[in-house]
Image (cartoon, coloured by chain):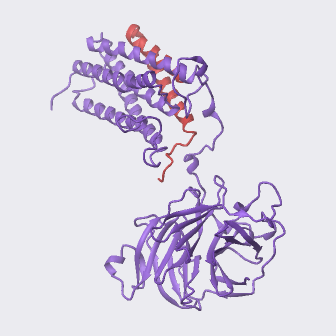
Chain colours: A red, B purple
Amino acid sequence: MEFLNFLLILWAAWLIWRRPERERLAFRLLVIACFLMALCFFIGSHGSIVPGVNL
Amino acid sequence: MIPLSEDRLRVILAWVVIVLVGGPVAGAVLLGVLYGDSPCILCWAERTCMILIALCGLFVIRYGPKPRYLGVVILLGVWGVYMALRHSALHLARDVGQGFSAPILGVHTYMWALVIYAIALAVIGALLLFLKQIAPAEGMREPTRAGRFAVGLFIVVVAANALQAFASTGPPPFFGQGDPVRLSWNPRHWVWSFEELEPYHISLRGSWTIPRPDPGSADPDPAHGPLAALPTLAVSGWERIGAPLNGAVSGFARDSATGRFLVTTDRYGVYVLDSTLTRVLHHVVMDKGFSVDLSPLAGAAFVGRDTLAVLSTNKSWALLTPVPRADDRAEWRHFLETDGQMSEVGLGRFQTVRAHLMYALAFAFDKAEQELITVSAPNPRHHQLIVSRFARRDMTLSSEFEPRLTPGLTLPAAGRGPADYLVTGAAVANHLLFAISAAYSTLLVVDLKARTLAAVCTVPGLSHPVGLAIRGQDLLLAQADGRVAVLRFR
């Protein structure tokens, strides 16, 4: 999924550079990439949101 | 204050993007290419977050500082700080030099991530501080030379990351791994897996979600215990703690030299009683909120001639000593209530290894070995009965073991074992640890030399035992309600 996320980011950067009139699509790609990154981290931490230390 | 125009902001942001992407993000790719360093799934997310922060910079360079870009970049910064803390927490408590993967300048990458996100947030704050105003959108602009270089560098570095991610984590739907192998461009060595999706205990605190033991709700029926065909030891008599206490009994000990008793309560009361259990010789109420966190007191022991030790369920300890006249000002910080004749001489925490992430409800002192002993309370995540021994000299762990069954003891069914017991009271004599379990009302005798369960017998009629003491040939089992069962044990 990390590979897919980088492709989305590349797509957004390409739009900013070469198709700036498609700002809305580029911003949506940014938001999707943010959620995908957060999902990957959540999966990697096995749902344990709070660090494994004394709170 | 020097105002920052939007034009100048775009130039500065271009350089910020160049530094962020060309520094840590490109550096991470180089670590992979040159040294085979592969990020774990959490590292990938942290690296991606840095790239997304840079992408927000490109948005501003192209379209101006719109509020939604600023909103996203601040959220990304805060999320990045959280990720770095959450990730670092996996390794911060390990022993010296035991971080994950290779360090850079002596610091591991997950800690560097924290520094980078903190700097990113500080830069965002500084730029907003100096920005004249967030003007209405002026529409897109052609990037400056620095802006064009930033976009080009961004695309090259992200493309390199995509290549590394393809080799290291695979195409979707594969995910990154918690413990990746080194980077290789040879497809034979690529590991594409779903291992991070395998079922785990999902909760807010993960493996640190340990329920507090509740001996009051334990099944007292000996017939339901994990060991079959056990002998029965009948209660030969009952006594009662007649002295007034401030709560239910939670720990119990006896000093063989003087006959005095030490009693703790569930309201942090510590009482020294006379040999008849009717008169209070000394008492204090501990301040649980001060310094070391004392979760409810669970055990008591006489340690040496004039030293009393109490244990809380989280394996914190306090050492007290009776004195003719305590210093009021010095002791005010230790006690909520005192008779003026008790002084605190030590406070600390036992560190365990095998009994890590397990509470303890039983406490004893081995006079011959000069060691304090705790017995773990098994929990759903760590279903083990662990005896931990600590040197009195420095209150540091000496040894830990799981008592083995002697040949005469049989288990009625698979999956049952000594860890089904919930030991709530203990005392030592002749290298034997006598331990009473609130679950199944069973007395366990552990041979501390052989590390075995030397004898086990049921004690019908008990209700929520919380402490055990030895008086000559008798075992005294104190219950939470203040009654004391007398057992004649040979």
Q: In this orientation, does residue B15 appear?
A: yes
Residue found at the far left of this picture: B1
Residue found at the far front of this picture: B449
Residue in front for this viewpoint, B232 or B432? B432
Relative to B262, is B225 above or below?
above
Quadrant including the N terminus of chain A:
top right
Q: Residue at x 36, y 73 (%)?
A: B333
Task: Report x, y in % for residue A53.
Answer: 48, 50
Relative to B401, is B126 above or below?
above
Task: Report x, y in % for residue B71.
Answer: 38, 30
Query: Would residue B432 be found to the left or right of residue B168 on screen?
Result: right
Disc tally is 0
Residue in front for this viewpoint, B165 or B398? B398
Task: Report x, y in % for residue B476.
Answer: 66, 82
Q: Quadrant of residue B113?
A: top left
Q: Quadrant of residue B421?
A: bottom right
Task: Report x, y in % for residue B73.
Answer: 38, 29
Q: Quadrant of residue B222?
A: bottom right
Query: Would residue B83 be found to the left or right of residue B1 on screen?
Result: right
Relative to B50, is B97 above or below?
below
Q: In this orientation, does residue B437 appear?
A: no
Query: Would residue B8 be found to the left or right of residue B22 on screen?
Result: left
Query: Would residue B50 be found to the left or right of residue B437 on screen?
Result: left
Q: Residue at x 42, y 11 (%)?
A: A14
Q: Residue at x 46, y 49 (%)?
A: B95
